[in-house]
Amino acid sequence: MTAATIDPAAAETIRPEPLLELSGVRAGYGAIEVLHGVDLVLQPGAVVALLGPNGGGKTSTLKVCSGVLPVTRGEFKLAGRVVNGIEASELARLGVCSIPEGRGIFANLSVRENLWIATGTGASLADLEEVAYTRFPILGERRSQLAGSMSGGEQQMLALSRALGTHPTVLLLDELSMGLAPRIVSQMYDVVGSLAAEGISILVAEQFARAVLPIATSAALMLQGRVTRVGDPHEIEEELSTSYLGG
């Protein structure tokens, strides 16, 4: 059968299985539900931009995907397998790495000590340092410096380095642009784009959509705990109001 004669049913059977998938996911904090049936798909090698205003559910969705926030209803799948209830440490060992909002570094530890902490996932300190100092030479110069005394951009480089040193399959990024100057934001998303080109699948939550849309393969708009629109990044950029996507 030639490509021209493949019917839709046959095409469906050869479509790649999602690497990460949320189906009807509900989750919350105590009695307060914040995700109301989220459907989201991350295909192998894709960059999905999760967009929307603060309070829309972006961070909670990433917490579900990183194993920090448990699913109360629906299914969280990894490579086709339901993993509801999986621990964050186990997800990390399976190749899902998260950089939370605020970067998640230890300000009172040195750069090298921050990298050492990431060895808990099984990576060696030597590998972590090689990845960090090769991709971001400034971190090599700062290896003995307290992380909290570095600039915001350098701290974000350190957070990315800790993640990349574990050789992740899936990278979850939450508000990468937070607190950074526009020039640094552009540099950081250039790095993210290069990671995607190397084959890492990336789900990035970002309030300021125009920072991430140039490297995204698809975009999902999240409002009031639901994904309300999924589509081509350029189409969504044209359609959505700058009042909540940011300039």
Image: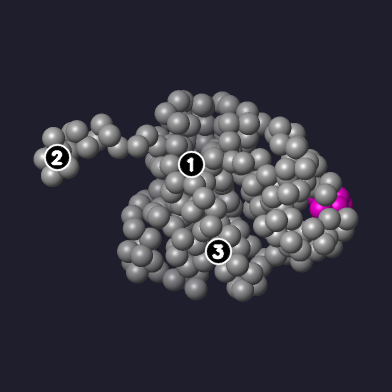
Which residue is located at x 64 percent, y 47 percent? 164
Q: Quadrant of residue 63?
A: top right
Q: Amino acid at mark 2?
A: Thr
User: Which image quarter holds the N terminus?
Assistant: top left
* Colour logic: one colour
Q: Mark 3 or mark 1: which is in front?
A: 3
- Mark 2 surroundings within 10 Å by alpha-carbon count, few (fewer than 14), some (14 through 19), many (20 or more): few
Say if 168 sits above or below 82 in the image.
below
Give the magenta range: 106-111
Sequence-wise, the earlier of marks 3 and 2 is 2
Q: Which residue is mark 1?
A: 35
Q: Amino acid at mark 3?
A: Asp
Which residue is located at x 56 percent, y 46 percent? 171
On residue 2, which mark appears?
Answer: 2
Q: Which residue is mark 3?
A: 190
Question: Residue 215 location in percent, x, y?
Answer: 46, 61
Q: Quadrant of residue 123?
A: top right
Q: Is 179 covered by the magenta stretch?
A: no
